[in-house]
Amino acid sequence: MDQAERGFSLSKDGPLDMRMDGERYPDMPCAADVVNTLDQQALASILTAYGEERHARKIASAIVEARRVSPITRTQQLAAVVAGAFPAFVLYARKDRLQRPAHVATKTFQALRIFVNDELNELHAGLNVAQAALKPGGRLCVITFHSLEDRLVKRFLRGEDLSNLDQYHFSPKKQGSRKERVVDEERDCKSACWFPVRRKVITPGKNDVLENPRGRSAKLRIALRC
């Protein structure tokens, strides 16, 4: 992920690639293809769905305007285009979970990476394979690193139908009372193929985060095959 030539990094200039397995699948569209080909509405939809970016329309508009002048082919070129859509004081106004300054283009890069690699569908496919392979009593452990992934895993374990992810919105559900949530969870457990080993998700401790800052958003869910 840190290699500039793979195109994931905001801080290191490289080709706007972002493919996890580009050498194996050279014909697979890369991030530059997405940025320079899709229309403004499609780009905004990607940024909203996979980056949870509040300013998706503004960023998509800036990308379309910039590519009319010259194709966007480098990581720092894209970062500059996104930054240009905001006042200078906003560039590092956002904070990550460690309260460190986060570049305004971080969510844009995240959204493109998830879309290019079809990450949610890949995760869903892996969960289905695990469900088919594990015998009753078999244990499934899943570590996610983003809220979209965690919501998918949580709803999969509850037995929800996720057969069409393109039409499934992984936004947080409206929270009811604690009693209503417990009743919903019990109902979900009865219809699901999984039984949660722990009610609460496992997250990194302070020492874990200090040793591995990239794992700060990790969540571990464990369930038994019913």
Image (cartoon, rainbow, N blue to C red):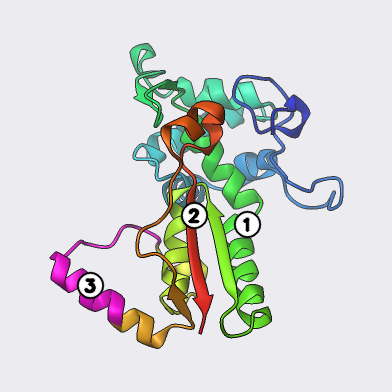
Provide residue 206's location: percent of width, then percent of height. 42, 32
Mark 3: few, some, or many residues within 10 Å (few <14, many ≥20)? Answer: few
Residue at numbered disc 1: 118
Residue drawn at 73 percent across, 46 percent down: 20
Which span of residues is magenta-colored?
A: 170-186
Q: CA distance from mark 3 to mark 1?
A: 33 Å
Q: Amino acid at mark 1?
A: Asp
Seen at 45% across and 54% down, the residue is 148
Mark 1–mark 2 distance (CA, rounded to whole Å): 21 Å
Task: List x then y, in percent, for residue 183.
Answer: 21, 78
Q: Quadrant of residue 77?
A: top right
Which label's residue is closer to the chain start, 3 or 1?
A: 1
Q: Is residue 4 visible?
A: yes
Q: Which residue is mark 2?
A: 220
Residue drawn at (63%, 84%) of the image: 135
Is 177 within the magenta? yes
Q: CA distance from mark 2 to mark 3?
A: 20 Å
Q: Are marks 2 and 3 in contact (CB under 8 Å)?
A: no
Relative to 196, is 81 above or below?
above
Q: Nearest to the eye among marks 3 and 1: give it.
A: 3
Residue at point 39%, 87% (across, down): 191
